[in-house]
Image: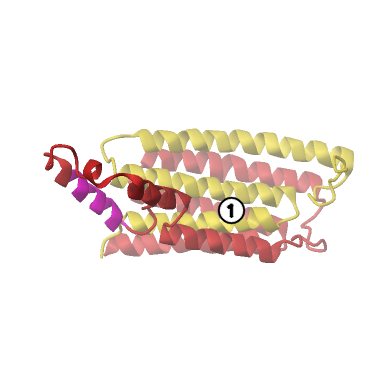
Chain colours: A yellow, B red
Amino acid sequence: MTVGLTHYLVLSTLLFCLGLFGVLTRRNVVAILMGIELMLNAANINLVAFNRYIAPGAVAGQTFALVIITLAACEAAVGLALVMAAYRTLETIHVDEIDVMKW
Amino acid sequence: MGELAAFIILALVTLIPAVVVVTSKNIVRSALSLIPTFLGVTGIYILLSAEFVAGIQVLIYAGAITVLILFVIMLTEGGTGVRVRQVNEQVPLGATAAVWLGFLAGHGRGAAGVQRRDHRDRVPHRLRRGVRGHQPGAAGLADRRDDHRETGGLIIR
């Protein structure tokens, strides 16, 4: 039995579901960002696997994966800077306690 | 056979620390569990013969992002956060959403599949078969579509 595209897609689905669970259930903003990183990794696995099995000669899938990795790094830097700013003013990083914009 | 064993080991190295990431009460432990997850994904990239992406993954994810997350944890929480409740009231809802998404992807019966089936039903029969009857290349196209279907239920039919 060889490893096919389905194996990678199943792995990517499981990783995405774990990231979604983390995003929906954690209170800590940093933990939510970790869940987002897991989901972005799952998308990257999908892109590279489709590149390998559907279009082996092209490198478009790997290029997309590189773009997503760069975007994830930028998003983590900006998001964690926002976390630091929120902690300085509100003294908490729990999302259910940051409700200053709620009516 | 060796490739399958490597894939299974790498998938376990990826998924087990990912479970720790989303469930651990200790926020530092969950940040450190990100590292084996990212390294497992790196191994998956090497299995997929995408070595450059694997190198970038090690540099950016396992190197930069993990260190950034650890710095922010140490600058904000003032500890590991084990005495604080780490999950909100949406745990059943989140678990339901995650399982439902996995079920949906496994069966491939998303909204796109429903729309496509409706569209196919709406097309008249004579247009579906082509105006001139048999067209060269149509059989090859159908074969290719069947190949896509055989790759598993994950592709939306």
Snapshot quadrant of residue B32: bottom right
Which residue does the numbered mark 1 point to in the structure image? B34
Snapshot quadrant of residue A26: bottom right
Q: Is residue B128 left or right of residue B91?
A: left
> A34 above or below B84?
above
Quarter of the figure with the N terminus of chain A: bottom left
Find residue B131 and report its horizontal and vertical position in percent.
Answer: 17, 37
Q: Which residues are magenta?
A: B140-151
Q: Tell me if I can see residue B24 in this picture.
A: no
> B136 above or below B6?
above
Find residue B149 and report its horizontal and vertical position in percent.
Answer: 29, 55
Q: Is residue A90 left or right of residue B47?
A: right
Q: Residue at x 48, y 46 (%)?
A: A43
Q: Is residue B59 left or right of residue B138?
A: right
Q: Residue at x 85, y 45 (%)?
A: A99
| Magenta stretch, main secondary structure class | helix
> B13 above or below A41?
below
Viewer-proximal residue among A101 and A54: A101
Quarter of the figure with the C terminus of chain A: top right
Find residue A73 and report its horizontal and vertical position in percent.
Answer: 59, 36
Snapshot quadrant of residue B30: bottom right
> Residue flagged by tag 1: what amino acid is it?
Leu
Find residue B103 and report its horizontal and vertical position in percent.
Answer: 49, 63
Viewer-proximal residue among B5 and A54: A54
